[in-house]
Image (cartoon, grey):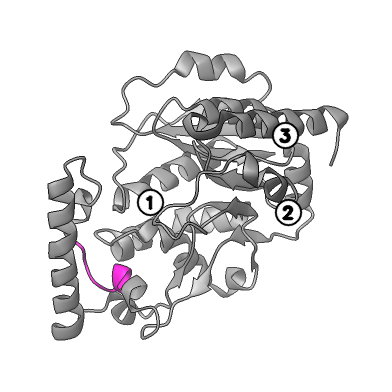
Amino acid sequence: MHAFLIMVHNNSYVFFENLRLIDSPQADIYVHVDRKFKDFDYDRARELVKMSELNFIEDRVNVKWGAYSQILAELLLLKAASKKKEYDYFHLISGSDLLIKPVSNIVKICNESNGTIFLDSRKLDKKQDTKLYQRVAVSHVLVNYFGSRYKLASVFARLVDKIQTDFKFYFLKQDTVKRKNITPYFGANWFSLPNDAAKFLLDHRKGVRDIFSKRRNADELFVQTILGNEEAFKNRLSNPRRFIDWSAGLAHPKILTMADYERIMNSDAFFARKFDATVDKAVIDKITLGVRDKNYEGEV
């Protein structure tokens, strides 16, 4: 049995379509709805799920971009699922993602992978990756304001943070990485973790908080760093099986469209992101129809 963990912040068309794709006797679904979102359609979600057990996280977090709240939401999802059942794998996705392989396919590949950890990860070099290294090396006290809806507040917080970061790092010589004697790793935060890796993260929640609270965009560091510093896990890291297109050169991935369809479906990924029905609804419908047809045919 696999657990699918979904972080949601709106009633997106793609999220509800994805629920129908995940719905399977081989999968349970856990959803964290951002606390600031007040109008989530719980009834619609429950109506769509027929075979999976659908669970909503009650202790919701106000998720702020770049802040520790993102890590907390992920840990709450892992904790809720691990308390419920002994799952073989835990898959973290967002409300903008789609399955592009049937659940039966994903379950088979994961269960036959000898405990592979599907996670984007690379080791950081202090000199070559200084800006990424600084995310965890020093505290970022204004990080909660980076994603403020007030643009002036966001710009001010980022500017002051840059000044403070360089001052702490170069003049005060602050370095949590060195002080904690850890090797930092970096990558996308979406993962597919086997049970033992997920349990290890939960067992080390205090360490996660001590190292990564008041850090910047640490959701792209904490899983990689915690697992990468443990001999039992670091050699099991592999392709995250996510189709994500960064070719636009922006701070966020490209919104996928029908022009990307063949590349998406010909990839070895389990999931693709990100989608937006207001940009291209047709590609969402075509993918969901294709995946449902394969699932119906029993393709594994």
The answer to whether residue 53 is visible is: no
- Give the residues drawn in magenta, as a range: 134-140
In the structure shown, which secondary structural element does the residue marked by tag 3 occupy? loop
On the rendered structure, is 141 left or right of 260? left
- Mark 2 → mark 3, Cα distance in angstroms: 20 Å
In the structure shown, which secondary structural element does the residue marked by tag 1 occupy? helix
- Mark sitting on residue 71: 1
Q: Residue at x 63, y 34 (%)?
A: 283
Query: Label 1 sits on what residue type?
Result: Ile
Q: Residues within 10 Å of mark 1 (few under 14, many from 20)?
A: many
Instruction: Say if the magenta span includes residue 137.
Output: yes
Compared with 44, 271 (above or below) is: below
Query: Label 3 sits on what residue type?
Result: Gln
Foreground of the two, 14 or 237: 14
Q: Which residue is mark 2?
A: 268
The image quarter in which residue 179 lies: bottom left
The image quarter in which residue 119 lies: bottom right
* In this view, the mark in front (1 or 2): 2
Residues at discs 3 and 1 in contact (Cβ within 8 Å): no
Query: Label 2 sits on what residue type?
Result: Asp
- Mark 3 → mark 1, Cα distance in angstroms: 27 Å
On the rendered structure, is 9 left or right of 276? left
- Residue 268, position in %: x, y? 73, 54
Q: Residue at x 18, y 50 (%)?
A: 154
- Residue 248, position in %: x, y? 48, 56
The answer to whether residue 38 is visible is: yes
- Mark 1 → mark 2, Cα distance in angstroms: 27 Å
Q: Residue at x 46, y 18 (%)?
A: 42
Foreground of the two, 290 or 68: 290
Q: Which residue is mark 3?
A: 26
Q: Residue at x 60, y 46 (%)?
A: 272
